[in-house]
Amino acid sequence: MSQTDAPAQSSGARQGTGTGPLTALRRYARSSAAIVVVAGIASAAVGVLLAPAPSARAVIELSTPSSSNLLAPGSANDATLTRYTAQRAAFVESDPVLEQVVGAVGGLTVQQLRGIVTVSTSAGSNTLDVGVAAATPERSELIAGAVVDAYRAQTTAQVDALTDAALSAVEASADEQREQLQLVPTGPAASAAATTLAGLAQQANELRTDRAVFGDGVEFARTAVVPAPGPPLREVALGLVVGLGLATAVAWLRADRDPRVEDEDGAALASGTAPLGTVSDDGPLRTLRGLPGPTHTPLASALVVTAADGVLLVTSARRGEGRTTTAANLAAAAAREGRRVLLVDADLSRSTLSLVLGARSPGGAEVRRLLYGDAEQWADVAPVPRYVDPAHFVHVVVAGAGGRDDTPADLARLRTLVEGARAEFDLVVVDAEPLLGGGVPAVLARLSDAAVLVVRKGTSQAAVRRASQLLDLYGTPVRAVLLTAASSHRRQRRARLARPLSSPRRPLAHLLRRRA
């Protein structure tokens, strides 16, 4: 692939990948989940902050007035009761009642009370619901109780006043009849006056009885209570829905700006090279026995047959893409084809292959010596034989720690040593560091005859493109692109394996004992 092809390839790669919303959400699962959770919490917080003040509720059940009741004159039918209930609801918010409440609780005016006190009636019953929404639940309960007490007291005073006025009128009428009797003590007129006096006396008795029975007109009053506020479920549900929509939009935009390799076509578009195929992740590499693995066997054998003898560089754009496993499988496939194979662990920063296989020698500096000229000839670097099966060997050269800047003398000596390896072995497979990790010596790429670029499903197309451009810049032809795919639990298992390998605090002997 030439550098001039990169812009066209980049455009083609973008056009060739259409990431759906669900795929984008899975790709950015953590950030998407964070957006949804934050939106839900924010919505719940807003719902709590904007929720109305706690309201105390008291219930007044009115007594059913008699037909002669002065507050509800007329027959006691449904229409009369409805009018009576509405009239008493209005009386709750009247000045006499509210003025008594102000005197009882203090700190408020009648106008302020009207702003926080509400009265409603229940259809088909003579029940008054008194609601009070004050600054605190305790204040609401206090005011609601004071409203009920004031209503009862003012209703009693109102009934007393009406009854007293009615009794005064009856007594005045009775006085008139008595005067008539004194003027005309006998005859029809006197008989009529006596009858009227008897009726007035009965009416007065009914008024007194009704006042005594009716009292304050309250059958019972339920104590004011503040309902316990429930969780803001509606606000949380709304926030989660909004957060999910926002997370989907953000993930989709991110996926569009950063397209990933999802299949072989995407790998081909990003790298500019035909993909060899796709293999699944068989888990962390632990031994060369039994290699190549079942998923690698056909692809590794096909690549080994078509690849020329020499130095084959196995690399990737970034870490965690299956580079070491691929290198070991390629080496094993070549050994089964009858070739004499050397597998070089050139990952100087982690030495994953060497640690997993337990192949690091006491000196631990073979690759460093190979790269930087501490060995005068190839015979000074002793490869460690490893079985593929009892009939086939893969020789392993393990990594050494450290490194230094390339100098012309180092490069010249290294070129000589690589040529010696070509003469000693049919195929040299180099497990190199990632191209974009900053640790791969450019000389390894320049001295390799070909490269295999390992790309994990989900890798950024831009990273694959950049890796291909670097190999093109080094003059190393990409023999094939191998697409790897792994499940999330295998990624986690590989991550757990990689942590102790890369930790400088754990001694090598401890690591090898754990892997024994």
Image (cartoon, rainbow, N blue to C red):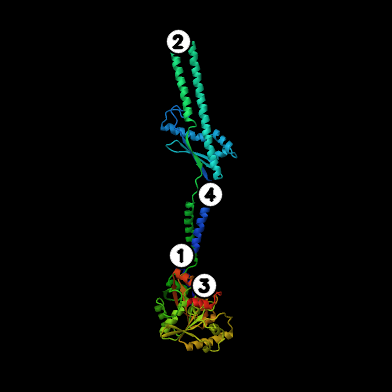
Question: Which residue is the site of mark 3?
Answer: 499
**Disc 1 or disc 2, which is closer to the eye?**
2
Q: Is residue 200 above or below residue 456?
A: above
Of the residues under marks 1 and 2, which one precedes in the sequence?
Answer: 1
* SS category of the residue bearing label 2: loop
C-alpha distance separating marks 2 and 3: 126 Å
Is mark 1 in CB contact (under 8 Å) with mark 3? no
Count of numbered circles in the view:
4
Q: Earlier in the sequence, mark 2 or mark 3?
A: 2
Marks 4 and 1 sit apart, C-alpha to C-alpha, by 34 Å
x, y (%) of residue 69? 46, 28
The residue identified by callout 1 is 26
**Badge 2 density bin: few <14, some 14–19, many ≥20, Cα 10 Å:** few
Does the rendering let one see residue 479?
Answer: no
Residue 314, percent across and down? 48, 79
Q: Secondary structure at mark 1?
A: helix
Q: Which residue is depicted at the point 52% across and 55% down?
A: 42
Residue 50 - label: 4
SS state under label 3: helix
Q: Tell me, for residue 366, which label it has, or none.
A: none
Q: Earlier in the sequence, mark 3 or mark 4?
A: 4
Tell me which amino acid carries mark 4: Leu
**Of callouts 1 and 3, the N-terminal one:** 1
Q: Using the numbered discs, state the Cα–Cα distance from disc 1 to disc 2 in whole angstroms.
A: 111 Å
How far is mark 1 from mark 3, CA to CA?
Answer: 25 Å
